[in-house]
Image (cartoon, rainbow, N blue to C red):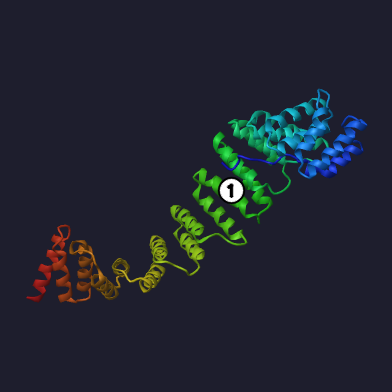
Amino acid sequence: MIHKSIAFPILLVGCFVFFWCALAGATDLPQLTPNVRNALVRAQKALSKGKLKEVEQDLSPLLKDNAHPLVCFILGNAYFLDHNLDRAYKVYDTGLKNAPDYLPLVENFASVCFELKKFDTAAVYFLRAWHLSRLKGHVNNQFLYNAAVSYYQNGQYNSCFKVLKELFDISSSIPKKSYCSLLLICAMKVRHVDTAVSYFKRFTYRYPAVSFLWLFLSKAYIIQKDYKDAAICLETSYRLRKKGATPKKWEELANIYAYTGAFLKAASCIKYGYSGHYSPRILDKIISYYIQAHNYKEAVSWLKRAIKVQPAAKRYFLLGKLYYEHSDFNKAICAFQKGIAISKAQYKRLGNIWMLLGVCAFETNRINLARKAFLNAEHYHQFYGVAKSYIDFISLLKD
């Protein structure tokens, strides 16, 4: 899963300025005694240098039932940096008893709960952190996402989805990819992919130039088996990317278009994706799309191109069949003869080709060639009756 880790706790090294502001006198924290203030200053300097043991020596004696929240905050951070999560949990918990609304402490406690796999508690405290950030006028929606991840990890998918809906409802900017990913995964769990589609449609309307929003919308459509809209959104996403999509991605998109019956779009996508660097396999795929789209001209053109790249009996036979279907018998004869000449197939596998060659030759009054072809076709039980009828008729003509 991509949601196994979330935001790292607020570490003191990253909150140096905040710490000194707190020392200057934060209104939502108890006053510091000179003894505690001096210990905190020493601990802060030690922590900034990575001297975790010194932090513990300075602050552990101050850890008691009514310990100052900053003492718990800094000491808890030291334990967290030292990967002593259980002690960090206990220290943060002690601090919260005296300062339940101290946002950095709430966030760090939520984070350590997550790391300890106490996901239900983590979710509760991330939600509290989000509400506190709103009250303080600097709302942080990452807390909502972290709460949703916690619920998801705990298997509480309905709670996760509820939080995610609130996150998307209040969002006034482009949602992060991680938000979109979790929304889609959770929507599948609770069977509300239609809700995810609604959110993705809303944000693609607001931010039509953001490629990954179209990508997630296409994924949601695929889950709903709405392959036509999925293909349109996926193509939009690919064309918006600065570096574009890989040829393989364009080929996958072509497969989706082909599945919906949009064979010309499928051909267009695969041609665009490979940009002239066509392997025989890709050429055969393009040919197949044009044939299914009943675009005879393009199919013949790409078949000729494929034959130049890699002459193969099957391509000559396919070219011959296309000519035959459009009554271009002389060209069909030429294609069939070239295919037979290079075919490594056993004699019994060419019955249909001999039959078609015979018909083309007969239609162009090349009687000897027609008779030879029908004699070969006569060896196959499925063509025996028709081939013999042609042979008998040719014999009558000669007589």
Q: Is residue 309 above or below residue 73?
A: below
Image spot of residue 396 (x, y percent): 9, 72
Crowd class of label 1 (few under 14; some 14 to 19; many from 20; radius 10 Å)? many
> Farthest left residue?
399
Tag 1 secondary structure: helix
Let me know if residue 290 appears in the view: yes
Disc 1 marks a residue whose amino acid type is: Phe
Residue furthest top in the image: 65
Q: Position of residue 4 (x, y in %)?
A: 60, 39
Q: Indicate the position of residue 234 as horizontal and vertical percent values.
A: 55, 54
Is residue 225 depicted above or below 29 in this figure? below
Q: Which residue is drawn at 15% across and 72% down?
A: 372
Q: Quadrant of residue 51?
A: top right
**Up/down of 76 relative to 336, above or below:** above
**Camera-side residue of 11 and 105:** 11
Q: Is residue 228 left or right of residue 119?
A: left
Quadrant of the image for the N terminus?
top right
Quadrant location, the C terminus: bottom left
Residue 104 lies, in percent from the top left, at 78, 36
Q: Mark 1 points at which residue?
A: 216
Viewer can see residue 14: no
Residue shown at the point (58%, 42%) measured from the top left: 184
Q: In this view, does 159 lie to the left or right of 349?
A: right
Please determine whether, in this image, residue 93 is positioned above or below residue 266.
above
The one of 203 and 91 positioned closer to us in this rendering: 91
